[in-house]
Image (tube, rainbow, N blue to C red):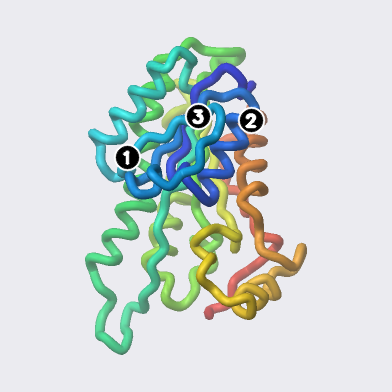
Amino acid sequence: MQISDTAAIVTGGASGLGGATARALAGRGARVFALDLPGAVEKAEPVDGVSYLAADVTDPEQVGAAVDTAAGAGTPLRIVVNCAGVGWAGRILGKQGPHDLELFRKVVEVNLVGTFNVLRLAAAAISATEPLEHNQRGVVVNTASIAAFDGQIGQVAYAASKGGVVGLTLSAARDLASFGIRVVTIAPGIIDTPMLAGVTDEFRAGLAGGVPFPKRLGLPAEYAGLAVSIVEQDYLNGEVIRLDGALRMAPR
């Protein structure tokens, strides 16, 4: 599927993986609508071809309004990339007692329920577009994590939420096949995003040292490049792709 002359939604699009993906899609000629929380949208750097919309991915009304905006922009909405997510840590049993239930619920709400909320609403809009060759109408790229497979100590909420994204991938692809909509998930390893901005160089080097090859952190541009490739490869559907330099995370 060609990217130019289409509309695209990227959640978490003000920075990190989403920001890089929004720039990459706009550079290929898409009209991109980058969804993020109000504070992040206010700080986002202007990018040609990218419009920033304040929206909480867990809020059906806010996401619905954003989807309507993208679908009504004059070019068909065919691309969605879900990058919005959070990653707070906590053990099931720690020094302060049992894992905070609200924290667990919040991580699952944003990472899993938020992803599904955008998927379902965007799919409805994409299904209304005119079909292309082989009856295809669009593609949704979701973001999991290698923590879905190799969850470390303290990652129970994050691993569960991302495991849910992995689990829905094939079922979603099968559900939406009759509408010509593909669903693919990327499971990144350790990517050098703003979430790592506060760590020391020593800690960063330790993270990179655990990656078999290339022995470095991943780059947001590499995630964006894979997302672009998924959009363009029409026969890629219902799959989870690890982007991790062959990293298999240890327990801690």
Does residue 236 appear in this view? Answer: yes
Residue drawn at the location 59% of the way across and 63% of the way down: 190
Whole-percent x, y for residue 208 in the image: 68, 71
Q: Secondary structure at mark 1?
A: loop
**Amino acid tagged 3:** Val
Whole-percent x, y for residue 185 in the image: 53, 45
Whole-percent x, y for residue 153 in the image: 46, 78
Q: Residues within 10 Å of mark 2 (few under 14, many from 20)?
A: some
Identify the mark at residue 68; answer none if there is no mark: none
Task: Check the image and report above or below for 8 versus 185.
Answer: above
Determine the CA span between mark 3 and mark 2.
10 Å
Determine the CA span between mark 2 and mark 1.
23 Å
Q: Which residue is mark 2?
A: 27
Of callouts 3 and 2, the N-terminal one? 2
Task: Check the image and report above or below for 79 versus 84.
Answer: above
- Which quadrant of the structure image shows residue 96? bottom left
Q: Quadrant of the N terminus?
A: top right
Of callouts 2 and 1, the N-terminal one? 2
**Amino acid tagged 2:** Gly
Q: Which residue is mark 3?
A: 32
Of callouts 1 and 3, the N-terminal one? 3
Residue drawn at the location 28% of the way across and 59% of the way down: 106
